[in-house]
Image: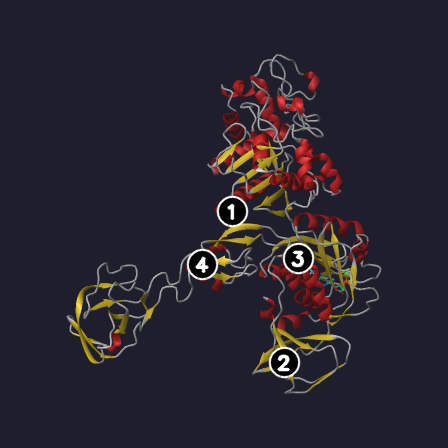
Amino acid sequence: MKGFDSVIIVDWSAANDTGPTPRKDAIWLGAVLGGAEIAPEYLRNRDIAMDRVTALIRSERALGRRVMVGFDFPFGYPAGFAAALVGEPAPLKLWDWLAEALTDTPRGNTRFDLAGQINARLPGIGPFWFNGTARDVPHLPRKGNDRTAEHGLPERRRAEEQAKGTFTCWQMGGAGAVGGQAMTGMAALSRLRRALPEVRVWPFEEAKGDVLLVEVWPSLIDAAVKAEGDPIRDRAQVRLLARALSRLDDETLAGMLDVDSPEEGWILGLGHEDTLAGVLRPAESAPLTPPPLSNDCFALPRGTDWVPVDAALAHLREHLAAVTGTEAVATADAAGRVLAEDAVARTANPPAANAAVDGYGFANGPELTGPVTLPLAQGRAAAGAPFGGTVPPGTALRILTGAILPDGVNTVVLEEDTTTDGTAIAFHGPLKPGANTRRAGEDVAEGQTILPAGRALTAADLALLSAAGVRQVPARRRLRVAVLSTGDEVTDGAPGPGRIADANRPMLAAVLARWGHDVVDLGIAPDDRAAIADRLDRGAAEADAILTSGGASAGDEDHVSALLTGTGSFALWRIALKPGRPLALGLWNGAPVFGLPGNPVAAFTCTLLFARPALSVLAGAGWTEPQGFEVPAAFTKDKKPGRREFLRARVRDGRAEVFRSEGSGRISGLSWAEGFVELPDGAATIAPGTPVRFIPFGSFGL
Ligand code: AMP
Ligand code: MG
């Protein structure tokens, strides 16, 4: 059997998408894609999860990979149930029946009613039981013991007899129950099969084909999950199960897939627990996965008091690494995306030699000097309408820009340089051989590396990729960055005495979107440790990094710093920078947190200087350096030594102007400015005409 290149594991949930975020029982997805483990993803409801799974399967297939997708709910009911409902022991027909009968939206579903309706079709009371609603659901008993045996169906599947600790699919709710998951899950997979016809379902269909759905049960690897110590168990389960299945060699996996259970289905790996545990044990030969950021990645050397800007940047550059996985993206949709691998030209550009101008094509030769007259051959060559034949020596052919050079033509004379009577042309030779033509591959050769891994694709890059026949690229998943404002005084409503409008969140969200990241809005948290911790929990679950503003110093109300202190990863960087107070850094549940100052001018400056290159590294695009240039100053300033200064500035008439006030509360100056004037760490005396370094905001990707 050919093995699988990618394994995706989904921890399903039948819960509704209501109530606070993050919900404990939402859906987690873990995956090893083409050998690379991705960070597990938090998917808040079934619709979002199925969209994500569908997109992942599509993009893996586009990369030519075979995919196995595991879901942690039963793929079938105990023997006899399918026949009772759809007339034959055909589990996939049952899936379609459930998809028809069940209404399922993120806000709610009809699983209890459907369970009651199915019970009503069968003799006696049951088999489904447990009513999770306050109202009575017809034919659905609240207690398992209220059922009778007349329906004649077994309580468990054969697999569940063997798997100690499984719940039966008849129990529709209650702690640990799987009835709701089975029902919503089979319905969702029925829809997935319809959307992606190449999907096969194990063990009901042959494990051939390139996408295989399998039933999994993470409890099979319980010991490894416990050892992982992840506070979010579901997250560890999907990560480790994807890892384990992706590490199985083809023969072992084929053995696990060799199961005869055409009606009830089976749990992949049941009976092979030791093998799964074995591949999860750390081994020399285990495939490399990118290590998580280490807890001390922000720790500065002992005794550091003030950090110079350059040292702060060097530290970030050295201690951060890419955290995003890979997916295939159509070139047309790839603006701003980061290439995960080098892009190689599939075709040459231009693909064939062609005319660079409108004119007449002919075979050039040394005899064609002085006044030249050539009879015209019949026909013409145009872009998209090639001339099929050969142009005889000593004749010329009408040719238009972009037309492939026909056989017998190696040179084109510009229309404006000729005269013609319709049967012949005249011009003055000599012309350089190849004049006014483009050679095949003169721009890009087939097989040439045209863009390096890590490149954030520009509009021009899309043109280049398209021209080189690259219609889709392996791209890094977008980096998800959460944004949180803090402060009792900060409001989304109208500002007034004691109430400051949240200026940072809209600013940071806009900046992040501009940089191509996905923004997760964490809102505003009051100056309350538990409230901020709650938002950080959500941020770490839903995003790869978190930007907070406010509360970052070391004072009474500086709760971001206080919370990060408790993680053991906290560092408060007192950067020798103006504007900008300390930057609070740390890891919250593994997600890097950039605790920016509350002051919008300082927050903006720190974001551009520090968060931008750091996020760029996390996104897989590598370190970025803003490009500045020297211009004469249009201002006067006596700068003291000790802190590097970034003045809000713009260039007019070739000279750098600075905003009239350096006050760090002056948000209007940010809006006025088009860049920074960067003044060095040391002292500086600046008079009109003194060269200063100007860095346009565009240089920071804005
Ligand atoms: P902090 O860093 O929390 O001490 O805040 C420093 C200053 O920035 C205070 O004047 C805050 O009111 C202000 N500030 C904090 N967060 C924001 C925000 N999101 N928008 C506007 N001003 C803010
Ligand atoms: Mg504050």
Q: CA distance from mark 4 to mark 3?
A: 29 Å
- The residue indicated by pointer 3 is 321
Q: Nearer the viewer, residue 89 or 163?
A: 163
Q: Earlier in the sequence, mark 4 or mark 2?
A: 4
Amino acid type, callout 3:
Ala
Describe the element under mark 4 as helix, strand or loop: loop
Q: Nearer the viewer, residue 113 or 343?
A: 343
Q: Earlier in the sequence, mark 4 or mark 3?
A: 3
- The residue indicated by pointer 2 is 657
Q: CA distance from mark 4 to mark 1?
A: 23 Å
Q: CA distance from mark 4 to mark 2?
A: 49 Å
Q: Quick one: which residue is furthest to the top in this view?
A: 150
Residue 249 visible somewhere in the drawing: yes
Q: Position of residue 488 (x, y in %)?
A: 77, 57
Q: CA distance from mark 2 to mark 1?
A: 49 Å
Kindly identify which numbered label has been placed on residue 284: none
